Each structure stands twice: as structure tokens, then as C-alpha cells.
Amino acid sequence: MSNVSIAGETRADFGKGAARKLRRSGMIPAVIYGHGQDVEHVALPAHELGLALRKVGLILEVTIDGKTTVVAPRDVQRDPVKRVIEHVDLVVVSKAEAAAVTAAAEEAVAAQEAEASAISEDSISAGEAQDAAEEAADHAAEDAAAEAGDGETAADAASEEAAE
């Protein structure tokens, strides 16, 4: 559904300190693997990657050192408190797999939209719900008064029942 091109750079430094340094400079550490290819350690722009990861059925075209690789996100690690992206695993996909992911994402979005429109057509507005609730409360008060009898209020009837 969403093909996004993003430029990255290879990274040679590994470990916690190197990853923190990358994040401070506005990059996110990532790895690209799959289809018998060697694991490639890369750094991707944090802002662009964050925006891209919001899309459904994302296929990334990552360009590193002039070479473009078609990948899909496999795992996204986020800080549990700040919710910022800490690391991304990207898996290489073929053009056929990318087309299948795109088609599946389009079907899922269409199904969600159809369900949302059906719900909105069947539901009542907030004003109608409030009117119905007020009407039900009025009927309940009238029924309670009718059960209480001649001139007695529902509270009087309830207190008499409690006394017995």
C-alpha cells in the first residue's frame, strides 16, 4: 500500500554507546537481513522512518551507498516510556512479496472502512441517545410513583418497605 524511499548509511560501530550516539544525531540503528543475504547494519533518519512506520502495509526502498534494497519492517523496538524508536529490523522482500503485502494491506483497510461506515449508519447520535435516556428516566419515575399509590412518592414507598 505504501512504498517509501529512504536514504541511509552503513554503520561500523556497534553496542549501546554507539547506538545512543546515533540516536542523538537523529539516526536510528537498523539491520537488514533475509533472502540469503548477509546481515547489513545501517542507520536511518529517525524522523523519516518514524513517519513511514505509521503507514499500513509499508514497503521501504532503502538506498545505501547507491544500492537500493526493498525491505519490510519485521520488528520495531521502542522505548517503553518515551515511545521513541530505538531499533528496527528490516527483512528483504522480493517484488512479488511486496505486491502481496500491498494487496493484503489494501484489503484490510477496505474492510475497516466498510465496518466503520456500517457502524456509523447503524448508530444513533449523541443527542438522540440523551433524549432516549431522559425519556426512560421519566417513565421510570412515573412507574415508581404509580406503584407508590395515592399521593405517596417513590421515596416514601421505599422507606415504608425498608421499615417493614
Image (cartoon, rainbow, N blue to C red):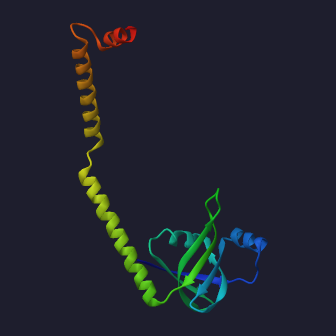
72 sits to left or right of 118: right
Classify 142 as above or below 22.
above
Write the residue at 29% across / 35% down.
Answer: 130
Classify 156 as above or below 142.
above
Write the residue at 28% across / 59% down.
Answer: 117
Q: Position of residue 112 (x, y in %)?
A: 34, 64
Q: Image quarter for residue 113?
A: bottom left
84 sits to left or right of 125: right
Q: Nearer the viewer, residue 24 or 41?
A: 41
Which quarter of the figure is the N terminus placed in?
A: bottom left
Classify 163 as above or below 113.
above
Write the residue at 24% across / 54% down.
Answer: 121
Q: Residue furthest front?
A: 164
Classify 64 as above or below 111.
below
152 sits to left or right of 89: left
Q: Position of residue 140 (x, y in %)?
A: 26, 24
Q: Image quarter for residue 92?
A: bottom right
Q: Position of residue 101 (x, y in %)?
A: 43, 80
Write the residue at 31% across / 11% down.
Answer: 157
Which quarter of the figure is the C terminus placed in?
A: top left
Q: Nearer the viewer, residue 97 or 12?
A: 97
Q: Image quarter for residue 118?
A: bottom left
Q: Position of residue 87 (x, y in %)?
A: 64, 72
